[in-house]
C-alpha cells in the first residue's frame, strides 16, 4: 500500500517562497514517477511538476518553469517542491502523486496514488 503525506503548505506574501514535502512509503519507488498537482477553487486539478525517481529527470508546467524546482531524496523517500517568486495565482491545494511507470504524464488520470493535499495561499 503506497502512502503519500504532504507537508509544508501555508500562507505567504507574493514574492515569497515555500517548500513542500511529500513523504512516500509502502514500497521502493525505483522506476516510478512522482508528481505535484494543484487545484484552485472552481478549477480543475492541474499538473505542476514531475520527477522520475530513477535518474531524476524533471518536467514542469510552463506556468511554474523557472520558479519551482522538484527534487527527491532517495534516502528519505521524500519528494520536494521548492516554490520561489510565488504569485497570488499559485494559491491552491497542492497534491503529491505517484505512478508506477517511468513514462511521465501531465494528466491526473495518469497517476495511481495521491496524498491528502496541502493548502498554499499567496497574498498580494
Image (spheres, grey):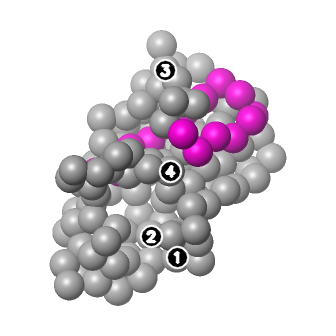
Using the rendered view, name the quadrant where residue 22 is placed.
top left
Query: Considering only order in the chain, which callout, 3 or 1, is on the residue closer to the N terminus?
Result: 3
Determine the CA span between mark 4 and mark 2.
14 Å
The tag on residue 117 is none
Q: Earlier in the sequence, mark 3 or mark 2?
A: 3
- Label 1 with label 2: CB-CB less than 8 Å: yes
Q: Residue at x 34, y 78 (%)?
A: 87
Q: Would you name the residue on which mark 3 appears? A: 2
Q: Is residue 2 left or right of residue 88?
A: right
Q: CA distance from mark 1 to mark 3?
A: 29 Å
Callout in the foreground (4, 3)? 4
Badge 4 density bin: few <14, some 14–19, many ≥20, Cα 10 Å: many
Q: Residue at x 27, y 76 (%)?
A: 88
Name the residue that disc number 1 marks. Answer: 67
The mark closer to the camera, 1 or 3, is 1
**Circles 3 and 2 in contact, beta carbons < 8 Å:** no
Q: Which residues are magenta?
A: 93-107
Residue at the location (43% across, 25% down)? Answer: 3
The residue where tag 4 is placed is 47
Nearer to us: label 1 or label 4: 4
Q: Would you say the residues marked 4 and 2 are in contact, meaning their CB atoms lie under 8 Å apart?
A: no
Which element carries disc 1, helix, strand or loop? Answer: loop
- Left or right relative to 56: residue 40: left
Say which label, 4 or 3, has the lower sequence index: 3
Q: Nearer the viewer, residue 64 or 120?
A: 64
* Residue extending farthest right: 55
| Of 76 and 29, the residue lying toward us | 29
Amino acid at each position: 500500500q503506497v502512502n503519500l503525506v504532504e507537508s509544508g503548505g501555508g500562507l505567504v506574501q507574493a514574492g515569497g517562497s515555500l517548500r513542500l514535502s511529500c513523504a512516500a512509503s509502502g514500497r521502493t519507488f525505483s522506476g516510478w514517477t512522482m508528481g505535484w498537482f494543484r487545484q484552485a477553487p472552481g478549477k480543475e486539478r492541474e499538473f505542476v511538476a514531475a520527477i522520475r525517481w530513477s535518474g531524476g529527470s524533471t518536467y514542469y508546467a510552463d506556468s511554474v518553469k523557472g520558479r519551482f524546482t522538484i527534487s527527491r531524496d532517495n534516502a528519505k523517500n521524500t519528494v520536494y517542491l521548492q516554490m520561489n517568486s510565488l504569485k497570488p495565482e499559485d494559491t491552491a491545494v497542492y497534491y503529491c502523486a505517484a505512478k508506477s511507470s517511468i513514462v511521465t504524464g501531465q494528466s491526473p488520470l495518469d497517476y495511481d496514488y495521491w496524498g491528502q493535499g496541502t493548502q498554499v495561499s499567496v497574498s498580494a
